[in-house]
Amino acid sequence: MNKPEQILVEKHLLPDDDDRPKGALYRFWRDLMTSAGRTTESCPDYLRITLLNLVQSTGVLIWALFLLLILLGVLEPSPGRLVIDATGLVISLAVIVGLRRGVAVNLAAQVTHAFLFLGLLGLSFTRGENPLMMTLPLIYPALAFLLLDDIRRGLAGTLLMTAGLNILLSSGFGPNLRDSDMLLDGALTITVVMLFQAAVMALYVYHRKQANTMMQAVSVRLNELASHDPLTGLYNRRTFIEVLERELARRDDDDRQLAFLLFDVDRFKAYNDVHGHPRGDELLKRLAATATHVFSRGEDVVFRLGGEEFGVVFHTETPEQAEEMADRLLAAVEAMGEPAPAGPHACVSVSAGLYLVAKGRDTSANQIYSRADQALYRAKEAGRARWLHASP
């Protein structure tokens, strides 16, 4: 079935604390975390964007503080430490600014993760004599899994970080350990802690993705229910109004003419009385399939507007082409060969009203429907199994 542009389920938001005035500090913090409003709590990338901004904002403070302490002589300067601190400050600022200017979230996450990995391992190497510095990489697994949002890459990074730290310890770059027992104890502690964090974060990421998948499926289903007729699968009256109003808004930009064909089954009540409602429902399904087959171009949209009433919004090069489409529909319905117990012909037929929307005319979706409906009833009064033009 041909589809109009995506119709979204309406969001009914409840008033909450966000409606109340907030202070300058709160507004600054929210602006920073959401990259100037680029994301909200309902966006899929909300967690990653806020995490990136939080990590990089913390990085700006830490790297700037370390550089200041080195310049003041509080900390002992070293080439490796200066390179890491300066590079960290530049990358942190670049990611924050880049996210605000629309840089892809995946790119920002990969850059952040790469420097996080190299920076933590580099600090352990350059400041390995400080036992506290060797504990910094323990924060890596949680951040890696959340930044990358991928279990396999997060686990691979954790294993590489664990291997790197164990190599540093065993090669003598770590703190001065007195004996092999202490070395083994430190290596096992680092390994167990890192792998435990990796297991916890892998479980979290897996279940979060499962929950997101379920929520997306529910959202799609709700969208289907809100915009489609459950019996025929066609778009419903609510979607009809939205599609027609959208086409009216842009009709002057299209060289073709916008058309609306409204039709319903002749003497459908009599058909239901003779054959029963289940068979009547089957007839409506067949009619929907027939109409969709006739109006099968990419922009043609067929609707069930209620009961046995259907409509089609389409574009036509000429009025004659629209008239030909109406003739084809009526012929295709009778060609279904469904016996009509009360006429007007031997087989089930439809009556229709055709409205051609004039360019530049001030009109609305409801007015178009009303004019086509008047033409439809004139066709019924004229004997049914025919279509008539709606008045302009």
Image (spheres, grey):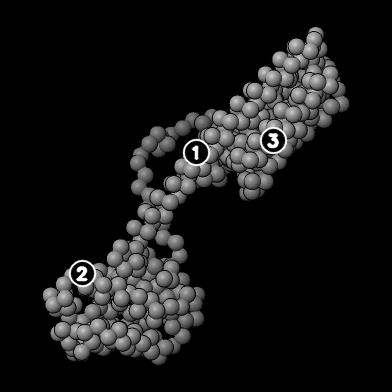
Residue 245, percent from left and from top: 38, 68
- Callout 2: helix, strand or loop? helix
Q: Which residue is mark 2?
A: 278
Q: Is residue 66 left or right of residue 207?
A: right
Q: Tell which of 374 and 293 is nearer to you.
A: 293
Q: Residues within 10 Å of mark 3 (few under 14, many from 20)?
A: many
Report, in whole angstroms, how far the alpha carbon at label 2 lies from the one at label 3. 60 Å
**Residue highlighted by disc 3:** 157
Q: Which residue is mark 1?
A: 207
Q: Which percent across, then down, holds residue 14?
A: 35, 41
The span from disc 3 to disc 1 (Cα, nearest Å) is 20 Å
Residue at x 65%, y 26% (from the top left corner): 194
Earlier sequence position, callout 1 versus callout 2: 1
Q: Amino acid at mark 2?
A: Pro
Of 157 and 261, which appears nearest the observer? Answer: 157
**Whole-percent x and y of residue 170?**
81, 20
Q: Is 186 left, or right, of 71 in this rendering?
A: left
User: Can residue 351 be seen here?
Assistant: no
Residue 29, by quadrant, is top right
